[in-house]
Amino acid sequence: MATGVLVVGCTGALLEAYDAADTSRCIDTTSLYAGISSGTINGAAWSPDGTLLALALSVSPYLAVVDTATGATVELSSNPANAGNGVAWSPDGTRLAVAHGTAPYLTVYETAGWTKLTFTSTAPEGTGQSCAWSPDGTMLAVGHVTSPYLSVYNVATGTRISLVGGNPAGTGLGVSWSPDGTRLAVAHSTTPFLTVYNTADWSKVTIAGGAPAGVGRACAFNIDGSRLAVAHATSPYLTVYNAADWSKRTLSSNPTGTGNGVTWSPDGTRLALAHTTAPCLTVYSATTLAKVTWANSPANQGNCCTWRAAAPLRVAAVAPNVVKDDAGAPASRVHRIYRRANGDLLGVRTSSAGGEYSAPFLTGMPVQVVVLDDDDGAVYNDKILGRVIPA
């Protein structure tokens, strides 16, 4: 069964997050970070280490980078030029790309100081809609409005790679690299709605199973590259291909509206689709493509989704929140917080001189708090606090 955190960005500045083990809704945008109260979350991406969540926003500041341990937003050197539509981290986490409206349509940040990087002298020709780094970080693909609709850049030189097989037929709304980097998929606005390239020679792959039924909105390869999921307009709204022969897989039942975002769980067992019509999120078993029962659903239209393997997410105070020594007095002690259900380490903290502590993780998740001996001070017994539920 999939674990971790599934995040869905929605219309109305809502950010819905779910603990994939129990599918309880965990947070919304107002409890995750301050300052965003209107607009739409168009894109979302976890940093490789899972500590930061980048959000492409339709209103200023157009990009929010959230520290998931504190809920604070990172201070950027300056904002993107206009509405953010897609966002992607480099594999090593040192750069963050944002596809956006208004020239230069693509902004890349160096994450060490959050300064803008002069990336290329040949910007995309129109509004950036999506972006994705190759698995080795040597290339950056950007889907955009206006021909050629897809720009693939050599990161080292900033030069654009020639698409020998020809351009996609319309606006590149979603891009995804296969895990081995040998293929690049583009979901786009004009028939055939999906184009896949062999990156060895940039020839187009023949999609034997046929095109998706409508405008391609997003796409994603699974963890081993054996399947490609495409979110699109027009029923069935989600199409899954076998990448070996490009035949289509059959869903047990369709989602209820246009697919806008698609993501596979990191362990490869689940496939999630964010879509326009209630319940706005549908999750499938990756093996059977049967719908998985999901306890809660987004309050508004789902525009994007992203799945993170690690468990911690948002700040929540732990109760009881005072560590005491053997004599019952408040003490400064190192403690570790574990998820009670499966033993995942959620955080390591040191209580203050008054014994107070708090920790970041999913609201309502039962945990075990293990209070450790002070290595350099007095010898105390280690303590295990039983079933602790965050406030």
Image (cartoon, grey):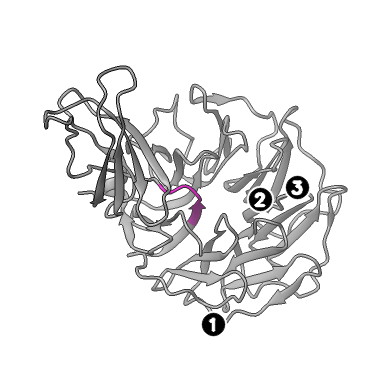
Q: Which residue, given by chain and number where applicable, does mark 3 sit on? A: 181
The magenta-colored residue range is: 305-311
Mark 1 → mark 3, Cα distance in angstroms: 31 Å
Residue placed most toward the observer, 385 or 136: 385
* Distance between mark 2 and mark 1 Cα atoms: 35 Å
Q: Are marks 2 and 1 in contact (CB under 8 Å)?
A: no
Q: Which residue is mark 1?
A: 253
Say left or right for 300 vs 161: left
Disc nearer the start of the sequence (2/1): 2
- Upstream in sequence: badge 3 or badge 2: 2
Residue at the extreme top: 376
Q: For the residues carrying marks 3 and 2, which lies nearer the camera in this image?
A: 3
**Sequence-first tag of 1 and 3:** 3
Which disc is residue 146 wearing?
2
Going by the image, does 176 lie left or right of 47? Answer: right
Crowd around label 1: few <14 · some 14–19 · many ≥20 (10 Å)? few
